[in-house]
Image (cartoon, grey):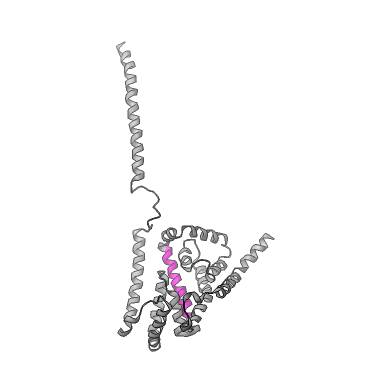
Amino acid sequence: MRVRVFRCCSLPNVLSMAAPRSLLVEGGRFRDEENAEDSPTSKKPKSDAKLPLSRWEFATALGVFFIFSTGLFCIYLTMPAAEYNKIKLPRTIADLRVLKDHLATYANLYPAKFILGYCSTYIFMQTFMIPGTIFMSLLAGALFGVVRGLFLVVFNATAGASSCFFLSKLIGRPIVSWLWPEKLKFFQAEIVKRRDKLLNYMLFLRVTPTLPNLFINLASPIVDIPFHVFFLATLIGLIPASFITVRAGLALGDLKSVKDLYDFKTLSVLFLIGLVSIFPTLLKRKRIYE
């Protein structure tokens, strides 16, 4: 009887002891989960306020920038010492006129060195998205004329855009997703819809100012545009706008502002050329509906 009484009395005690323990365990787990969520090492999506770039990606971009900068500086040292203080990137049409007057003599005396420095500077600016390439295009027209100037501008713009393409393929996804999240989604959807006629669509984007060239260069590898399509669209699609800019460089003295390059008439011509480039796509879509 004593054993039975002991068992009957001990059962509630066991239950009363087990219940707090279970609550403590569950409470501990709950607190651990809260602490894990607040912990900086927990796997939570990073805030959009901070640039999501890893250390090796940043180091790679910095290394490429350093290599380009070193090469450009070595070319700069080959110029006469008297020209050092006169060389700077133009930011206005007035600055460009002054730079053109200083470089005209040097370009005639040392054409190979000048072209090497010009191409290196243009590609460097295009690769690292440094604004001012439109002034470089105007300078090409002012110093070399339409034919040679157009060849130089298209070559450098294509080479710089290609370098930017591969750099973005390496480290660009977090940067583009951080800067233009909605625009990137829109671009991705448009590429998926036009995958069959992708070259025509890319030509349209290059010819017309529908999307900025900077965004196209950075976003193209992220949305899986093949490089050969990107290269051909860039090489061909930049010719009309480059021709307008280079030709305007011949009359640099009459140009008041960069905005004068692209008036309503010029933009209308560019959009007309762009519509011609996507005409096969529109025709195919019409046949499918019929």
Q: Can residue 78 be seen here?
A: no
Q: Is residue 166 magenta?
A: yes
Answer above or below: position of 153 versus 197. below
Residue at 34% in and 73% down: 69
The span shown in magenta is 151-169
Q: Residue furthest top?
A: 1
Question: For the N terminus, which image quadrant?
Answer: top left
Residue 35: percent from left, percent from top: 33, 42
Residue 14 rendering spot, x and y as whole percentages:
32, 22
Main secondary structure found in the magenta portion: helix
Q: Residue furthest front?
A: 256
Q: Where, by quadrant of the figure, is residue 268 drawn?
A: bottom right
| Residue 69 against residue 29 in the figure, above or below | below
Q: Residue furthest right?
A: 290
Q: Is residue 29 magenta?
A: no
Q: Nearer the viewer, residue 50 or 204?
A: 50
Check the picture and name the quadrant holding the C terminus.
Answer: bottom right
The residue that appears at 47% across and 65% down in the rendered structure is 215
Query: Image point 34% across, 20% down: which residue?
Result: 12
The tally of labels here is 0
Q: Is residue 206 above or below residue 5?
A: below
The image position of residue 6, as x and y in percent, is 30, 15
Q: What percent of the width, then of the height, locates residue 263? A: 54, 74
Query: From where the camera sits, is residue 18 visible?
Result: yes
